[in-house]
Image (tube, coloured by chain):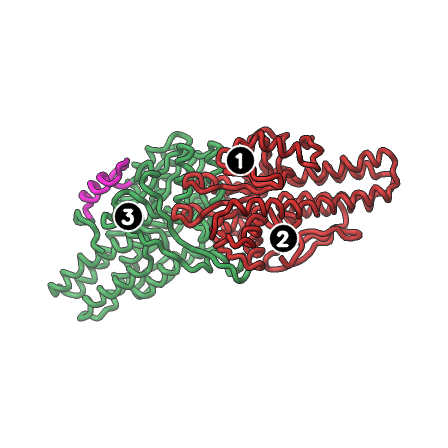
Chain colours: A green, B red
Amino acid sequence: MNAHTVALREDHVELLDQRLLPGEVRYLRLETGEEVAGAIEAMAVRGAPAIGVTAAMGVAIELERAPDRDLGTSLERVCERLARTRPTAVNLVWALERMRRSLLPRIAALEPPTEIRSKARALALEIQAEDIAICRELGDVGAELLPEHARVLTHCNAGALATAGYGTALGVIRSAMTRGRIKQVLACETRPFLQGARLTAWELVQERIPVTLITDSMAGSLMRRGEIDAVVVGADRIAANGDVANKIGTYTHAVVARHHGIPFYVAAPLSTVDLGTPTGDWIPIEYRDPEEVVTFAGQRIAPPGVEALHPAFDVTPADLVTAIITEGGVLRPPFGPALARCKAREPASGGGRSDR
Amino acid sequence: MNAHTVALREDHVELLDQRLLPGEVRYLRLETGEEVAGAIEAMAVRGAPAIGVTAAMGVAIELERAPDRDLGTSLERVCERLARTRPTAVNLVWALERMRRSLLPRIAALEPPTEIRSKARALALEIQAEDIAICRELGDVGAELLPEHARVLTHCNAGALATAGYGTALGVIRSAMTRGRIKQVLACETRPFLQGARLTAWELVQERIPVTLITDSMAGSLMRRGEIDAVVVGADRIAANGDVANKIGTYTHAVVARHHGIPFYVAAPLSTVDLGTPTGDWIPIEYRDPEEVVTFAGQRIAPPGVEALHPAFDVTPADLVTAIITEGGVLRPPFGPALARCKAREPASGGGRSDR
């Protein structure tokens, strides 16, 4: 891909404005934690892992600006602010917790401010580098699940743009492509924000991975006609029992895939797994502004006076998921014990749940 | 509704240009059969029954212009041209056949040209008036199927705009509304053409029927949360065994409704039933220009070089349909015998199948 999702510069976070894609590649220059929070809320960046990395960089940038004596309160304040931006994706809280846990003891121990700032910067970059490595790992693991000449359906964008690079669902597809296993990717456009049309198609066209764009409503009919071999999606949060929150529309694909006996795979780093959320019923679903449904590119598509709903995510129950693809391997049902085992081995989690 | 779908004037067909809705109410003035055919192809009018009525008027207008000695060849030519406009909806062929069968013997019998023209006009108006009466009948019949305080999902526009007036699926909803049974209509926006956002929402807002607009991808999640009591859709063609072709996305709603035990109703006049089509596999599915998928509200949403698919319809197998609501009553499975019985009683069909 000819663009990076996010980078930590000397005095700002450089963030690709994904709202302008595919028409324009433009970077935002974000100089404060507040600016980073605003960009996440406005969906200049989206995708659970990418939001986590961006937030960690937002913490580092905020600490660069904070007076020496205020590092502790600045850290708490910026983490609290960034955590409030979007409720569903758990990687955000996971990344912020990692920053807090590493930095607070140093601040309490009165380590030199320059060292604390440099540690913050190093940790944000570490989270970023890890995310790319993890995506490559789970991509390689997941690629083995796909048949030869696979026609793969994906929803939304769980690609390089949704992560620090490479992608989760698209990571699986990229790895499968290098093994010669991909015949065609069916990309759902993903209303209302059109991440599939704007972002997934853009990534795949650049890498010459054969991609065909469809509306979300066409997937079921293609499954019925035997034209889809597997569904691979990302996740915004995976509950302890394996229930999966992901972009609105995912649940429908899972039900129809089950109806047709088509495998339904979820690809996500373990940082997306939240053992503190027992089931999908506990996952907060973000409701966004209905204006995003009734308008497009500033143009109104529905009559005045009509109400609209905009839940940004839905929950797919674990029993519709064939396997969860993580850097810890391919997990099969029952997911509860498998997820607990993997999370216990996850180095970054400190072996426990993220206490939010 | 503050607008009529189509009207037969002295020397032209006056057709509401539905592509401009909800922003603008503008009528096309169509003076030849060819102009009517072009308007149907370009989807200025859509909806199976509305297309049938418009085509019948197109025949009448063409005969007004044809020289006296050419009435027979003009009739054949304009019917053949209009039949080619869109392949899936069967009401089109049904209406054209009705015109041909009534007029050809008169032409062959050398009846006076003025009388033939006046018969053509009268028959087109009769088809229009019948369509409204049929919609009211099936609306009243179907309304009884809905529970009190019903939250009803509908897809695309099977409303007054899709018919000569009143509507099929929206006819059921209108009738249920007058009985105080409707709590909420969930209208799927219906990509790529947005008939739900632009047309269904527009009709319902005008009549103060409570309507909430959702993207097509949200319906499954609402069903899972118990927020939908019934699905009611129209049809473009119903095969002899009860398989239903309707707007792309319908099949997915049917599968997810079945998964949740939610009744899935199809509302259509008997002219939509084609006993000459044994099953859904025989229904020709129209593939439209993929440009209609990669652009949204006139703006390009996908990167250059991406391919797209645009099947305009899908097929829902009979076993996912709870009941078919027609002017002949509510039909229950097995649909084959029930449809054959009703069609045999249908006055306009001459008791037989439409021989196309």
In the image, which disc is placed on residue A272? 3
| Residue at x-position 46% and y-position 58% | A292
Is there one chain holding both mark 3 and mark 1? no
In the image, which disc is placed on residue B18? 2
**Where residue B113 sits: x, y (%)?**
86, 42
The span picked out in magenta is: A326-348
**Label 3 is found on which chain of the structure?**
A
- Horizontal side of B115 relative to B229 (left or right) equals right
- Horizontal side of A337 relative to A88 (left or right) equals left
Q: Nearer the viewer, residue B272 or A103?
A: B272
Is there one chain holding both mark 3 and mark 2? no
Q: Nearer the viewer, residue A326 or B57?
A: B57
**Label 1 is found on which chain of the structure?**
B
Residue type at mark 1?
A: Arg
Q: Nearer the viewer, mark 3 or mark 1?
A: 1
Report helix, strand or loop for mark 3: helix
Q: CA distance from mark 3 to mark 1?
A: 46 Å
Residue type at mark 3?
A: Thr
**Where residue B202 sits: x, y (%)?**
57, 57
Above or below residue B337? Residue A53 is below
| Residue at x-position 58% and y-position 32% | B338
Report helix, strand or loop for mark 1: loop
Q: CA distance from mark 2 to mark 1?
A: 34 Å
Which image quarter holds the C terminus of chain B?
Answer: top right
**Which residue is identified by label 1?**
B332
